[in-house]
Image (spheres, grey):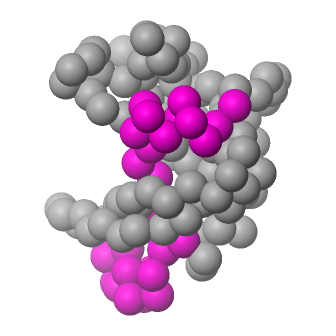
Amino acid sequence: MLFNRIKSGQIYRAIDDVKTLGMVICKAAGSGGFYCTIPKGTKVVIENDPWPWPISKGVYAAPLNYRELEDKLVPLEERSSPIYDMYTLVLTFKDLKKYFVKEDMEEIKFDDERMQRHWEKYCSPQETSQI
């Protein structure tokens, strides 16, 4: 099954526009959610290894063009909140299989310093393997 092969750090490219759910990451306790459409051609990075099936139905992912898409994906009312910090995308295994193809890349480089720091501190396979 697809979920057995999905790993943190893998990159997938959208082969069509994909309607999905996004999640707001707040500076304080709590989070919000929103619906969005990931544009065709967007490359996303899997943030963490998925939980085993049937517990997990999907994964969190972040687009490499994180900053470029932030204004387009995250609603203004979320972004303008004083506790707004970042966002992530929620991709189901079904959507990954249907709308994305795996890409090979040597280095994960985001267009946003916040996301790059977040990746290096919390998500990078090198970092999480030491925990």
Quadrant the N terminus occupies: top left
Q: Locate residue 87, reporting x and y percent.
A: 45, 61
Which one is nearer the viewer's eye here, 130 or 34? Answer: 34
- Answer with left or right where residue 18 lies relative to residue 108: left
Residue name at image x 54 percent, y 30 percent: 97
The magenta span reads 73-101
Residue name at image x 77 percent, y 51 percent: 41
The residue most toward the front is 98
Q: Quadrant of residue 100?
A: top right
Q: Is residue 5 above or below residue 118?
A: above
Quadrant the C terminus occupies: top left
- Answer with left or right where residue 23 lies relative to residue 67: left
Residue 119 painted magenta: no
Residue name at image x 18 percent, y 62 percent: 29
Callout count: 0
Residue name at image x 71 percent, y 68 percent: 68
Q: Is residue 26 above or below residue 125?
A: below
- Residue 116 in sight in this render: no
Q: Locate residue 72, reporting x and y percent.
A: 61, 77
Q: Is residue 123 above or below residue 51?
A: below
Q: Locate residue 43, reporting x and y percent.
A: 71, 45
Residue 93 painted magenta: yes
- Residue 90 in sight in this render: yes
